[in-house]
Image: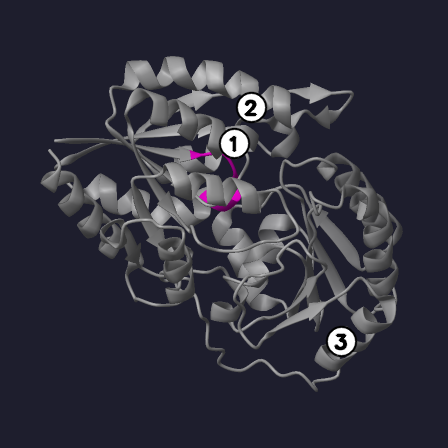
Amino acid sequence: MYNIGIFTSSRSDYGILSNIIKKLNENINVRLKIFVAGSHLSKVYGYTVNEIKKDINSELIYCPNIIFNKHKIDMAASSNKLISIFKKKLDRSKIKTIIFLGDRYEILPAALICLLKGVKIVHIHGGEITEGAIDNYIRNAMSMISNYHFVATPKSKKRLLNFGIDKKRVFLIGAPGLEDINKYLFNREFLEKKFNFKFYKQNIMISYHPETLDLENVNKNLNILLSSIKKFKKVRLIFSAPGADLKSDFIKRKIKDFSNKNKNSIYFDSFGHKDYLSFLKICNLLVGNSSSGIIEAPSLNTLSINLGIRQRGREKAKSVKDLSFSKNLIVKTIKKVINGKETRKKIKNPYYVYKNPSSKFVKILLKNLKKRN
């Protein structure tokens, strides 16, 4: 029997991990426990642990760690609290292997505890680059302390090998979040009824997060974005909430205020993963700096405008347009989409490598764990 844990701290990483969780749950040789932390357990961010509870029947281990200081998230204090809570919960769990995904700041303190206690660390989505966020440092640090690496692209694999990581521990599976991404999505009518609103003929999703290595310009950049999209009065503007990062509270207040003042705009505090992908599929365009515009949007045949430096360095499909925070450039590019000069067609996604990455992940992982038992 393999005692395996999975760590999730946000709606975004849970959505990507969900198929892997289901595959592990189906394996009679696996006893799975889910460590839940971060924004999942915060009412401010929608208490998204409820989505996990609806989806799976694995044991959930709660690690509430978010601390606010004057209504702003204190990442250092939150990390410190997580270390204390996670250590106690890890000791009681008796797991031998734990799975982490990506580059959220919460994963590093938890992974360090695992390293010190001899728990095998499995990391997904290593070897990528996001130059405009502290995520880049966290992802690289995770690569240095992990035992097994499951990467999304050949270039990511090569980058890890260049770090000196043993090639026998690096496995190419593609992006797990793309598995069956177009199946079982909701249609317009369902979403309109559920969220009590109406799509327009043309719709834009806006997903903007702070550039955590350029916090001084968050207000300036957000103002440019909002003044750019304000021109499109006949387009439905759909805002999703930012993740639990520094300045995210400021961004949330600003886009809520914008939505209240512009009748074609609507703000959602929290989507379920399936809801978010359904919106993204329906919309003509995604504007912002979310990784979903780079990894998921191309497989939904949705065009995206990637703003600023947060995602600089990531591999991108041709459907992703990199722009600086320039009102003229943003308006001009959106007009091309709205006027039909940029069309939605089948897009080749560099993150789609295998049809069933979650099955491949489980097979490789259990094979390697068996070798070392």
Q: Which residues are magenta?
A: 8-13
- Residue type of the residue flagged with mark 1: Glu
Circles 2, 1 touching at the beta carbon (< 8 Å): yes
Disc 3 crowd, CA 10 A, few/some/many (<14, 14-19, 20+): some
The N terminus appears in which quarter of the rendering? top left
Above or below, 221 against 269 in this view is below
From the image, state whether disc 1 or disc 3 is nearer to you: 1
Q: Which residue is mark 1?
A: 106
Q: Which residue is mark 3?
A: 333
Image x and y of residue 319, in percent: 58, 75
- Residue type of the residue flagged with mark 3: Thr
Above or below, 353 against 360 in this view is below
Disc 2 crowd, CA 10 A, few/some/many (<14, 14-19, 20+): many
Of 180 and 32, the residue lying toward us: 32
Among numbered discs 2 and 1, the one appearing first in the sequence: 2
User: Is residue 276 visible in the rendered structure shown here?
Assistant: yes
Image x and y of residue 68, in percent: 69, 21
Label annotation for residue 79 = 2
Report the residue at 82% width, 47% height from top: 217
